[in-house]
Image (cartoon, grey):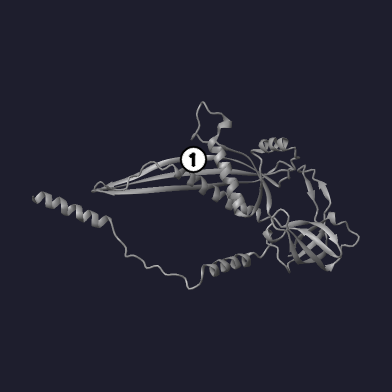
Amino acid sequence: MKRSLFTASALALALSGCATQSPQVESQESPHSQQAQIEAQKAAMEASVTNPILKRKLALGRITNETIYGKSLLRDDKGDVLGKQVTDMLSKALTESGQYLVFERPDIERLKDEAKLTGQELNLVGVDTLIIGSLTEFGRKTEGKSGFLSSTKKQVAFAKVDLRLVDSKTGLVYHSLSGAGESSSEAASVAGFGSKAAYDGTLNDAAISNAISDAISKLTAEMQTRPWQTDILAVEDGMIYISGGKSQGIKQGMSFNIETQGKVVKSKQTGFDITLPGKKVATVSVIQLFGDNETNEGAITTISSGSIDGLKYTELNVVEAK
């Protein structure tokens, strides 16, 4: 009888030492309506855009699984399920970031087949950068601790992706980066009571997603170091129409410089074409935006200083005014 009482007392002490309960927090509603909060967030986001954001045209090339996970002797490169998953997740994340125009390349043959079936011509758009890379590290581990009447089990998944940014015109790899991420779940039990840590397959997807997010953050930081530039669409009735609109952060009242295109010469040292600096000829101000999506947006500008008389507008560039 005494032994039973002692065991029960020890169990109660263990439970009270391992489990705590916080008092319930009373929920409070904001004094502002939900619509007012949404409008305030939207205004804050628009106000944060101070410089135009040139949406680079990207395409995904070869993204493969170079780890031993998910491979077998009976599966060839075309059956690279994990590589296809990484490609799809990377394409989705790039598109949702709102910073890029992402074009289809891995399944381009399906687009060609569809064009043949419908009798339409496939009008492909060239890209600025081709992304090539692979999943280079991927794995799982289980960690655990055991104590008096208690135990914990933690599952951890880790992933790493390596990407290369390739100039589609020259084939030059101008930047490389890596992204890493991990995901974990933990379960604990006391005296046999508590949750059981069964195999959690979603940790794999979460780890890859975190690695891709890390890579895109680094990719965006690299892209933002390049100056914003666009072209002139037309010149009519004293108005200058340029590419780029609201989705690129262009607003009414913004000013841009118009420069001549510099002469292109070939370097004997590197073998690459080098564009010499252009000359500023005018400054324009945005008076109106047009278009309803990122593929057909533009801006109407007027000249505030200088002149483009006697110059071909197709040989001029519009750049940020500094």
**x 49%, y 34%: residue:** 70
Where 272 sits versus 16, above or below?
above
Q: How many numbered circles are shown? A: 1
Q: Residues within 10 Å of mark 1 (few under 14, many from 20)?
A: many
* Picture coordinates of residue 146, whole percent (x, y): 28, 46
Which residue in the structure is indicated by mark 1? 138
Where 149 sits versus 70, above or below?
below
Q: Which amino acid is tagged 1?
A: Phe
**x 53%, y 38%: residue:** 82
Residue that extends furthest to the bottom in the rendered view of this protein = 31
Q: Nearer the viewer, residue 229 or 164?
A: 229
Where 314 sits versus 90, above or below?
below
Residue that extends furthest to the top in the rendered view of this protein = 74
Which of the 4 quarters of the picture holds residue 111?
Answer: top right
Q: Nearer the viewer, residue 295 or 74?
A: 295
Residue that extends furthest to the front in the rendered view of this protein = 118
Where 277 sits versus 287, above or below?
above
**Residue 290 visible within the image:** yes
**x 47%, y 44%: residue:** 158
**Residue 278 visible within the image:** no
Asked whether, in this view, residue 25 is left or right of residue 135, the answer is left
On-image quarter of the C terminus: bottom right
* Picture coordinates of residue 227, whole percent (x, y): 71, 57
Asked whether, in this view, residue 64 is left or right of residue 120, the answer is left
Which of the 4 quarters of the picture holds residue 251?
Answer: bottom right
Q: Nearer the viewer, residue 178 or 125?
A: 125
* Picture coordinates of residue 238, whole percent (x, y): 86, 65
Residue that extends furthest to the left in the rendered view of this protein = 1
* Picture coordinates of residue 84, whole percent (x, y): 57, 38
Element at badge 1?
strand
**x 44%, y 70%: residue:** 29
